[in-house]
Image: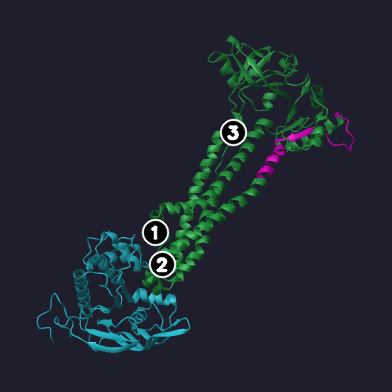
Chain colours: A cyan, B green
Amino acid sequence: MISWTEPGRANSESPLVIETRALERHYRLGAETVRALRGVDLAIRKNEYVAVMGPSGSGKSTLMNLIGCLDSPTAGEYWLNGQPVSGLTDDQLAQVRNREIGFVFQTFNLLPRATALGNVALPLIYAGVSRDEREERAAAALRAVDLGDRMEHRPNELSGGQRQRVAIARALVTHPSILLADEPTGNLDSGTSEEIMLLFDQLHDEGQTIVMVTHERDIAARAERVVTLRDGLIASDEPQVPTRLSHVPEGSSG
Amino acid sequence: MKLGEAVRTALEMIGAHKLRSFFTILGTVVGVTFLIAVITLIQGMDVYMEEEFAGRIFGVNSVMVRRTPSVQISGDPDFRRQLRQRPSLQFEDAEWLAERIETPGVIAISSTRGGRVDGPDGRSIDGVRITGASASYFRVRSMNVEQGRAFQQQEDDSSAPVAVIGRDVADRLFEDTNPLGKTIRIQGFSYQVIGVLERQGSLFGMSMDAQVIAPATSRLNGFVNNRNILDEVTYQVPDARYLPAAMVEIEGWMRIRNQLLPNEPNNFEIETAEASLAFWTRVSQIMFVALPGLVGISLVVGAIVIMNIMLVSVTERTREIGLRKSLGARRRDIVRQFLIEAGTLSGLGGLIGIGLGAGLAALVAALSPLPASLAPWAVALGLFLGVGVGLAAGAYPAYRAAGLDPIEALRHE
């Protein structure tokens, strides 16, 4: 049962979206082998809001790339929505990314020459969606992030916060299983960061599963679970009561 | 993404880098321009040779007997000396032939030389084609008299001082007045104008309207050629199927007339329009052989430039490629994008080349007597080569782009 005081909180019966077992990733640097991940077991259920933290070099970016299907593990298993993805080819991984993952990057990564609408519609091109449907769905996604009146603007005509909201709309337009955000507020001032974090809260309330890599405590505080990595291993994995700075619901301490 | 849409996206990309795109496709533009211009001019010449030259110089379905070839491309001095030693062609030879030829047809004789014609009130015109001919000449050359009449056989037999003049001569000497019945002086000899030819146009830039035609036996005899000597005898058959028979027969009679032994070569020329076109066929064949090499060189250079620019473009857009891959683009999607971009770019070069080439050919056609004729297959070839060069040159850069690691590419500064 989900009450408004515990918005979107996943429970133990929710299906697993991400499950990794003994995930390892090694890199060769000259003669040396760097073991970026040394056996990570992680399970994330539908509608969880997880922050991944850790100092640089802890392996959080590597884990992020593996979860995002941008990379394949050296050893171990990874199931995404119950489907094994550890052994897929590059092109199969591309299709999984297209269907299951919505990326939000620190630097937004919008195509400078395309309009907001064109940027949001981009993943749908690779999903083989017709032009009309692409525009329709992209417009809906932009309205959902409150940019219904900025559809024909190009990135250089938008503020930083608006650009990140376009990027979030692009991540959501395919209705992915996971919204995977990598330091989404790293390039934004604190006011704009708050605006973006509120949007994440709202998406989570609507049932979106979110995994966010960050090194900022107050950003991680918005999640309901914090996974901390150190030296390629999970150092801690704690549930927490999310802090919602600007509109803390009364009596939310339960 | 549909092809049309991908091409439009590529065009936007090209539009965003106008100057660079222009330099990128310069090689393709030059190659295709050259290709189209040369093909267009050769084709134009072909059409011209077959339709104009053959009919106007030789007459339709005609065999010509001459002392020397009408078109000479060999500069061999021995051959030229041989030509000079040939016997001249005389009025009597034509009469002798006319009595003997059994293949149906009409015989005409003619000699032509440039000269001066004087009209009334001190008006005169220089550089006129002055032809002494038999009455049948008009029919054999398909020349129509639009005003007055052509001269008749009896007038030719009686050396009557009558002349048919071309349109330009009529306009220059008589302006708006009626030239019929007026007297003109051809190289000083008085002639009465009895007809004006309908407009003939020009041939190799030479006006065919600045001409006068008078009976071969009239006083021009001796001016247009040595006295009683002919440039050519033309025998026109009623149908092309009589041509081979006429040629064989005329050649035989001429050998008898010139008393040649069986092992001696002809000391005269027998020509038909087709035979004289053989030289042109050879010239155009040579040009068609040389053309692919020249066009090929510019297209190869064009391809190298396109490949370089595409490689630069791949490097510049590494992040974009990484992003596209992270959003689900497969290798083939990236390959396709870059191939379409390169193909569109140089296809555009091909189109510009077709336009410039056709323009160049039209310019040459306007400034020279050479005609131009833009063949649809040449346009298709130009476009095909343009797009093909882009696809060939874009293949390696596209392959490089598709092989990028999305993580590295996204990190690229």
Q: Which secondary structure lies at badge 2?
A: helix
Instruction: Confirm whether residue B77 shows in the render.
Output: yes
Give coordinates of residue B111: x percent, y percent.
73, 23
Check disc 3 and give the amino acid type. Pro
Q: Mark 1 points at which residue?
A: B9
Span shown in magenta:
B257-284
Q: Which secondary structure lies at badge 3?
A: loop
Give coordinates of residue A116: x percent, y percent.
29, 62
First of labels 2, 1 by sequence position: 1
Q: Name the residue under label 2.
A: B318
**Residue positioned 67% across, 26% down in the render:** B139
Q: Up-down: is B299 above or below A205?
A: above
Q: Up-down: is B379 above or below B115?
A: below
Task: Give whichever of B224, A225 is nearer the camera.
Answer: A225
Distance from the alpha carbon under mark 2 to that under mark 3? 55 Å
First of labels 3, 1 by sequence position: 1
Task: Give whichever of B123, B26 is nearer the camera.
Answer: B26
Quadrant of residue A136 within the rendered picture? bottom left
Check disc 1 and give the amino acid type. Thr
Task: Give whichever of A229, B197 is nearer the camera.
Answer: A229
Quadrant of residue B75 within the rendered picture? top right
Q: Which of marks 2 and 1 is in front?
A: 2
Give coordinates of residue A16: x percent, y percent.
30, 86
Distance from the alpha carbon under mark 2 to that under mark 1? 18 Å
**Are labels 2 and 3 assigned to the same chain?**
yes
For mark 1, name the chain: B
Q: Name the residue under label 3.
A: B369
Check disc 2 and give the amino acid type. Thr
